[in-house]
Image: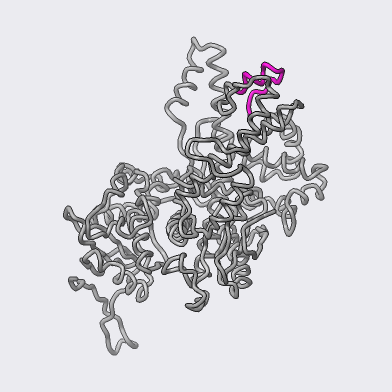
Amino acid sequence: MLRPTSRWTRVRASAGTSTVDAPEATAWIVLGGAGGATGEHVEAVELAADGSEIARTRLGAHALSSWVRDREGAAAPRWVWNDTPGWYAGLLADGVRVGRCHDLRLAHAILRDAVSVREAPSLRAAHEWDGAPAEPTAFDAAATLFSLEGDRSGFATGPPDGMDAALQEFERQRIAVARSDDPARLRLLIAAESAGALLAVEMRAAGLPWDAVAHDRLLTDQLGPRPVAGAVPRRMQEVAAEVRSALGDPAASLDSQPKLLRSLHRIGIPAESTSKWALAEYEHPVIAPLLEYRRLSRLYTANGWAWLDEWVHEGRFRPVYVPGGVVTGRWASSGGGALQLPRQLRSAVRADPGWKLVVADVAQLEPRVLAAMASDGALATAARGRDLYVGIVESGVVATRAEAKIALLGAMYGATTGDSARLLPRLRSAYPRAMALVDEAARVGDDGGVVSTWLGRSSPPPSASWHDVQAKASDVGSSRGDEDRARRWARDRGRFTRNFVVQGTAAEWALAWLADLRGRLAAMPLASEGDAAIRSGRVFARRPHLALFLHDEVIVHVPEPAAPAVADAVREAADAAAALLFGAFPIDFPLDVRIADTADKS
């Protein structure tokens, strides 16, 4: 390892009588490849708060983890790198946790599209940073950027990984934020997004405790014994026979929606969809077994034995999270279905011996966020300390909780027919500020405009096809069909932007909640070595850690003695997130917090 060069600042020790030399504080450390075809070296550049370079260090790749551990302990900098999974997975495998980072790829996506960033031509022209995340295909330190073997195939589609590219992009981003309409909010959004990136890698590293035996038992109870490869489980065959008998067609296809709909039409059921809600409208002997067949089929195909074999190993489910994978900022997953944990499988999520799960979910997250964004005191009052929909009923706006839910969700998602449309005028009268916010977002979308979340994430602009449809409808020779199509496309975009501002801001609140909770968990005492959850990895075996995130729910894996303190921390983090985003506005985010051995909700 080469010794770093340093920049020193002359600081007065007392009232002008003497001076001492002191190193300038490191605020950021940028990591990047040091060049060469093998990827055997990494460069680290330390920057002061103003972005000026303090020190530059060249490291052998296998020395990086120990060097990062030392600098994290000494300076607690914000680590700047091209893409969090490529760097952080290997650090965690080596037992190194970092507190903060700045993910250049995620930040680039935010700033590139943000309407508050008015002048950033060089940033928007840096298309090499537009790529998808480049994650290793398995959680393996050998697959990370700093592998001495030089296998960087896992990063082929990712952003640039060299130091020069990282420094240039970081400078572009700092300038773009500083010149934006609201630098403070964008900085907070980027910090939250980057904290989420750290958590996504950490949750994959620690894994979600999973009882494969319980899962197998559940599958056997529901589907029958595990079939041989290519065969259909026994219970599915039995139910399929009931369905075909009710259809009067022993050869009916039950797994092709068009063919199944034709079979239903032949027996007088004019359904247009095979969804549960569409079929529930009809009374016929075929409906009950058909719904049961579809339930079993979903279980078998989405979370059956093949899923169990692929995704659960050594008592852990390790999904691949994709922070910011949805345009609103919500997370996605690129494998394992992490964000769709079926209720019937939650009993398989089981804490290790001597540990507990703290399971917490937020009640009516998006409506509460809407109240805060709009500063709608009446809606906030309806929500305070209670079920928000019950609060709407008790305020006299509608008669039942079901009506309150239908009306408010319809307002946020743009429902224009049925009960939602009938009840919407009552909401507009009772909660004018909240309704005006989503109505204005819809109007902007109808007109082809762009909307933004509370912290500044902007919606993508309309596609070229959308503009073509609108232009064709405006032509002198346009037909009634052209005009109808243009209006339909405009309404669809309006519904998208109406919900974008609320869903996106709810995602920001959730990130703030996660980031605050992550810090609180890291500060808690370690469990004894005898109580370690070894399968959670070197960093998390002895400390409470987040194990799953599902939009408005978290599962924390904790040593049993720490469970009450962790439950308190989860609530306190929710309060802190509300204050961080919405200041003193009186909105609360009540949580349903449970301490249990499993994540079962039954």
| Residue 184 visible somewhere in the drawing | no
Q: Nearer the viewer, residue 294 or 20?
A: 294
- Residue under the point 48% across and 14% down: 475
| Residue 447 visible somewhere in the drawing | yes
Of the 4 image quadrants, the one containing the N terminus is: bottom left
The image quarter containing residue 147 is bottom left
**Residue 439 % position (x, y):** 63, 37
In this image, 41 relative to 510: left or right? left
In this image, 500 relative to 434: left or right? left
- Residue under the point 46% across and 69% down: 534
Q: Is residue 329 above or below residue 55?
A: above
**Residue 191 % position (x, y):** 44, 59
**Residue 490 % position (x, y):** 55, 27
In this image, 21 relative to 440: left or right? left
Q: Nearer the viewer, residue 488 or 258?
A: 258
The image quarter containing residue 59 is bottom left
Magenta run includes residue 208:
no
The range drawn in magenta is: 260-274
